[in-house]
Image: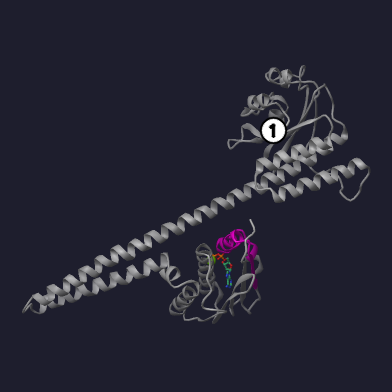
């Protein structure tokens, strides 16, 4: 057995082609990078990585295993040319210091080279699974994330006892690096999809609650008010005391109705569903002026702009966050808002003349409001920029393309 310390530092310098072998390696790496960028499915990406590497390295068969959520087991990732029976048998195996090449590589966080499975002690419990399939030699390298956490392993199998060349090790390290990128991209995408889904669920819930408060509670209160009016009329000579009580009940009902209107429209501005996006912007601007005494002017390129309902909710929430930030942080006196529709995109610009956002805040991971804006813009494959000039205000620019290419 031979072990080497890991680390991706010696990925080949891509500018220097020492030989046609290096050129082929570079070509393969580029092809894999393209697949990582274009292919949304992790499974297909990992399969393609293994296939490309098998084309590069003759007579070797590749396998990628992934660490499961517990961090203690390896599960099947991709092994298009290993026997299915073998893959099924090792799927879910525990990692450990005597767990074949991959289980040990993941456990010790080291490259493990087993030249002969038949005689190596690491394979004592596993050789009966491998040998019947003509798998005699297995070299495995851990796939690390950026923080050094093990994400899985990449392994190469040979049908005779064999030792890797320097070239094989070099290729293995580059594959582990590329596989790590693929897994990271996929995890980020999964997280984003999950957040989008949650956002939609929240919006739907808000809509439902807003409707129920508005319709049910609002109607009941109105009915109580009508009943009270009729009682008031039917009581002749009610007396001063009774009149004062009735007045009080009226004022409680009015207050409650006002709360119903406010809470339901804060949860989900009905104007957005009924009168469209531009009117909802104006409604929000009027509210903002009322609450803050900051002057705010809205211009739109046309009142008739029709948006996808999900997009209009996202843009509206972005707009609310931007105005809240202005009232909380900017000390601005004037705000200008432009909403434009061009042939190819929608543009929302929000300009204030306050203190100007500090550039540290723009990139701060704790700026959750700004992060939320970015996430919503990304869903629509749009662009978000925010710029501050000290003492000269902050400008937010959001563009959303009209055609979203999936
Ligand atoms: N219009 C603005 N003018 C000045 N500073 C701003 C403006 N908008 C945001 N900021 C700064 O950026 C920070 C991050 O904003 P945000 O992510 O919305 O978080 P939060 O509003 O919860 O503080 C704010 O704390 C504030 O310092
Ligand atoms: Mg905020």
Residue 388 image point, x, y percent: 64, 73
Q: Which residues are magenta?
A: 362-387
Is 368 magenta? The answer is: yes
340 on left or right of 139: left
Q: Quadrant of residue 352?
A: bottom right
Q: Write the residue at 82% across / 38% down.
A: 171
Is 79 magenta? The answer is: no
49 on left or right of 302: right
Q: Along the line of sight, which residue is nearer the eye, 331 or 141?
A: 141
Q: Quadrant of residue 231?
A: bottom left
Q: Write the residue at 69% across / 23% down.
A: 98
Residue 212 sits above or below residue 302 on the image: above
Is residue 146 shown to the viewer in this render?
no
Residue 76 sits above or below residue 286 on the image: above
Residue 129 sits above or below residue 34 on the image: above
Point out the image quarter for the N terminus: top right
**Mark 1 residue crowding within 10 angstroms, few (<14) / some (14–19) / many (20+):** many
The local secondary structure at tag 1 comes to: helix
Point out the image quarter for the C terminus: bottom right
Residue 302 image point, x, y percent: 55, 79
Residue 345 image point, x, y percent: 63, 70
Q: Along the line of sight, which residue is nearer the eye, 296 or 329?
A: 296
Residue 22 image point, x, y percent: 89, 43
Q: Write the residue at 67% across / 49% down.
A: 185
Q: Write the residue at 47% across / 81% down.
A: 293
332 on left or right of 82: left
Q: What residue sits right under mark 1 in the picture? A: 106
């Amino acid at each position: 057995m031979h072990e080497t310390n890991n680390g991706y530092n010696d990925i080949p310098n891509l500018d220097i082609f020492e030989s046609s072998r290096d050129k082929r390696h570079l070509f393969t790496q580029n092809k894999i990078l393209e697949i990582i960028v274009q292919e949304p499915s992790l499974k297909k990406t990992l399969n393609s990585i293994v296939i490309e590497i098998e084309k590069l390295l003759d007579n070797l068969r590749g396998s990628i295993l992934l660490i499961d959520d517990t961090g203690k087991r390896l599960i099947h990732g991709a092994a298009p040319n290993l026997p299915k029976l073998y893959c099924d048998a090792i799927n879910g195996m525990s990692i450990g210091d005597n767990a074949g090449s991959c289980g040990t590589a993941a456990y010790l966080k080291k490259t493990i080279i087993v030249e002969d499975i038949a005689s190596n002690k690491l394979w004592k419990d596993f050789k009966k699974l491998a040998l019947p399939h003509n798998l005699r030699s297995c070299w495995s390298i851990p796939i690390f994330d950026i923080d050094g956490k093990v994400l899985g392993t990449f392994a190469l199998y040979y049908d005779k006892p064999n030792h890797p060349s320097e070239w094989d090790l070099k290729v293995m390290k580059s594959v582990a690096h590329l596989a790590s990128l693929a897994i990271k991209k996929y995890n980020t995408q999964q997280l984003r999809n999950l957040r989008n889904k949650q956002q939609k669920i929240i919006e739907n819930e808000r809509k439902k609650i807003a409707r129920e408060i508005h319709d049910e509670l609002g109607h009941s209160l109105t009915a109580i008010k009508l009943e009270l009016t009729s009682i008031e009329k039917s009581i002749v000579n009610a007396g001063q005391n009774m009149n004062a009580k009735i007045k009080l009940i009226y004022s409680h009902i009015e207050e409650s109705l006002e709360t119903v209107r406010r809470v339901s429209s804060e949860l989900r501005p009905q104007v957005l569903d009924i009168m469209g996006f531009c009117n909802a912007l104006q409604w929000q601007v009027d509210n903002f002026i009322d609450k803050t005494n900051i002057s705010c002017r809205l211009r739109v390129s046309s009142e008739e702009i029709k948006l996808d309902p999900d997009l209009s909710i996202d843009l509206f929430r972005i707009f609310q966050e931007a105005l809240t930030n202005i009232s909380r942080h900017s000390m601005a006196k004037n705000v200008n808002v432009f909403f434009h529709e061009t042939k190819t995109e929608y543009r929302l610009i929000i300009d204030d003349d306050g203190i100007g956002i500090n550039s540290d805040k723009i990139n701060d991971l704790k700026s959750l409001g700004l992060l939320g804006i970015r996430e919503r813009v990304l869903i629509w494959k749009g662009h978000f920029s925010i710029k501050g000039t000290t003492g000269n205000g902050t400008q937010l620019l959001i563009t959303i393309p009209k055609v979203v290419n999936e």
